[in-house]
């Protein structure tokens, strides 16, 4: 009888691992559908890290889809329900929602807590009610929507092999600054959509209809300062994580350069982008440079 019980327990655990893998595979499909920039960076990571980053991206994307794409009358309830499902998946061992389940596996493995997910969902909830931001609400929104996501990714980079552990304060600062930079760059490139389709204005005091080149230059400079601060923290990351993050930084820096070279009136009317071929070139170059640096040691 005891042997039979051990086999059943073993079979159950094996099945749970299979479900983990199926959930992670489902989460991976989300990043493939939605983001070539982060997809390129994720593919440069060791497989365990890549799975965790894909799971984070999928969870964040689903919440974003509720407030940006669905926007139905019950969007608030849908978001509340998804947060409860995600929180349950983080605390338990099983969820019927495969994206929440995959995120729960990641959260337990690397030490992501509700101190990170709580502010994230609060920012997503703000998108349903706040049309214009002041300085205080903007800072709070960027913290929840982007800075804590940067910390989630940092937890993956530093804790995948060793397990949950506190994040170094300097590396956390760099991760938050990079998350903030990416979010603000996305705000700049999506001015037309945010103002025209969603009726939102994220940057305090900035109106897409009256946007000036001087205002764009100031916003670009702010993003560059965040990126420079984040670059200084790259040595704290494992080598392949550093190469992957460097690649996404290069992609967003090129996007920022394009924004800076675009007239404000055009920026307020159309979305700028970086060609996929350029993203692949950055990935190949950074991988080659890292290999050469390793061989020279």
Image (spheres, helix red, strand yellow):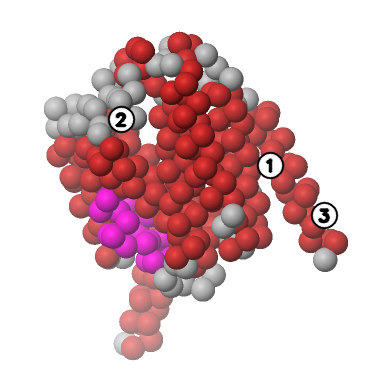
* 221 to 99, vertically: above or below: above
Residue that appears at 59% across and 50% down: 231
Q: Secondary structure at mark 3?
A: helix
Residue that appears at 75% across and 54% down: 290
Q: On the picture, is 278 further left or further right than 76?
A: right
* 217 to 116, vertically: above or below: above
Residue 68 found in image quarter: top left
- Image coordinates of residue 139 in percent, x first then y, are 31, 43
State the mark number for residue 292.
Answer: 3
Tags 1 and 2 touching, CB below 8 Å: no
State the mark number for residue 283.
Answer: 1
> Which of these two is toward me, 9 or 78?
78
Local packing at callout 2 (Cα closer than 10 Å; few below 14, some 14-19, many 20+) is some
Quadrant holding the N terminus: bottom left
- Image coordinates of residue 258 in percent, x first then y, are 58, 24
Magenta highlight on residue 78: no
Local packing at callout 1 (Cα closer than 10 Å; few below 14, some 14-19, many 20+) is many
> Which of these two is toward me, 133 or 21?
133
Magenta portion: prevailing SS class: helix
Mark found first going from the N terminus, 1 or 3: 1
State the mark number for residue 204.
Answer: 2
Range of residues picked out in magenta: 99-121
């Amino acid at each position: 009888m005891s042997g039979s019980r051990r086999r059943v327990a073993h079979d159950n655990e094996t099945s749970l691992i299979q479900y983990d893998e199926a959930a992670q595979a489902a989460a991976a499909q989300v990043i493939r559908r939605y983001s070539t920039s982060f997809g390129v960076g994720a593919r440069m990571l060791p497989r365990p890290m890549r799975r965790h980053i894909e799971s984070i991206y999928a969870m964040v994307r689903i919440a974003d889809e509720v407030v940006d794409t669905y926007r139905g009358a019950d969007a608030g309830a849908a978001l509340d329900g998804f947060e409860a499902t995600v929180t349950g998946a983080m605390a338990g061992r099983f969820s019927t929602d495969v994206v929440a389940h995959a995120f729960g596996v990641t959260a337990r493995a690397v030490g992501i807590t509700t101190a990170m997910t709580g502010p994230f969902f609060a920012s997503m909830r703000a998108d349903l009610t706040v049309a214009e931001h002041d300085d205080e609400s903007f800072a709070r929104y960027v913290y929840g929507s982007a800075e804590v996501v940067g910390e989630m990714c940092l937890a993956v980079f530093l804790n995948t092999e060793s397990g949950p552990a506190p994040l170094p304060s300097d590396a956390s600062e760099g991760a938050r600054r990079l998350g903030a930079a990416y979010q603000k760059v996305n705000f700049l490139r999506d001015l037309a959509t945010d103002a025209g389709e969603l009726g939102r204005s994220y940057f305090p005091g900035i109106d897409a209809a009256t946007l000036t080149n001087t205002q764009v230059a100031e916003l670009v400079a702010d993003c560059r300062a965040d990126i420079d601060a984040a670059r200084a923290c790259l040595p704290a990351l494992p080598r392949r994580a550093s190469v992957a993050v460097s690649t996404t930084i290069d992609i967003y820096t090129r996007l920022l350069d394009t924004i800076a070279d675009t007239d404000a009136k055009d920026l307020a009317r159309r979305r700028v982008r970086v060609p996929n071929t350029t993203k692949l070139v950055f990935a190949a170059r950074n991988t080659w440079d890292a290999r050469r640096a390793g061989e020279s040691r």
